Image: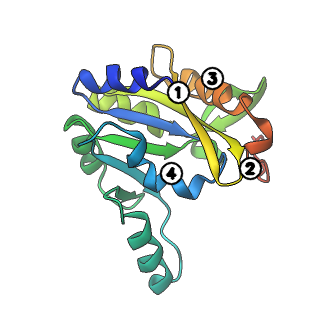
Amino acid sequence: TNVELLEQALAKGRGVVLLLAHMGNWELLSRIIHLFPPGSRTGAFYRPLNNVLLDRRVLARREADGTRMFSKRDPFHQVTGFLRGGGIVGILSDQRVGQQGALTRFFDRLTRATPLPALLARRAKAEMLALSLVTVAPGRWQATFIAVDAPHDTTSAMAALETAMRASPCDVFWMQERWRV
């Protein structure tokens, strides 16, 4: 739902930073290309696995539908260039990031959040949206695009992500020490 938000953002031609949460079956998000208009270029961040052989296999499956996977080891300019070319880059933004994160409020509690989405949006002059995934039946999810208020900073990103997660708290993976400051 709210696909018009994505279409409007893509029409500006500057790319879209898509805020994602560990909601629903988040591993399917690498196959999210099917939710976007035909011809869309999609990318996502991933953490390489420690086992090199297993990492190659998982990465190949995640890239099977054409999604470009970016590692935290990839140069920053590759991601911003991808966005500037009109690409859509998804970032799981609900993880605890430790001391290097930006201090912000999330569900009315002080925490640290990744500044990466806001930094990418600013550097690439890209738009920013959040995505909510709600289970509607076994193996079926409703994806809803959510606007991120300006300015596209970490605070507005986390507010939009909070809205996405409030759509179905039982679909959110809460098993992390999210609010440790």
What residue does disc 2 label? 173
Query: What residue sits 50% from the left and 51% below the top?
Result: 29
How far apart marks 2 and 3 lie (CA) works out to 18 Å
Q: Earlier in the sequence, mark 4 or mark 3?
A: 4
Q: Amino acid at mark 2?
A: Phe
Residue 1: give its label. 1
Q: Is residue 180 visible?
A: no
- Mark 1 secondary-structure assignment: loop
Q: Amino acid at mark 3?
A: Ala
How far apart marks 4 and 3 lie (CA) works out to 21 Å
Query: What residue sits 27% from the left and 38% below the top?
Result: 83
How far apart marks 1 and 2 lie (CA) works out to 22 Å
Label 3, residues with CA under 10 Å away: few <14, some 14-19, many ≥20? some
What residue does disc 3 label? 159
Residue 142 placed where, x, y %? 60, 37
Q: Indicate which label's residue lies in the foreground, 4 or 3.
A: 4
Q: Amino acid at mark 4?
A: Leu
What residue does disc 4 label? 29
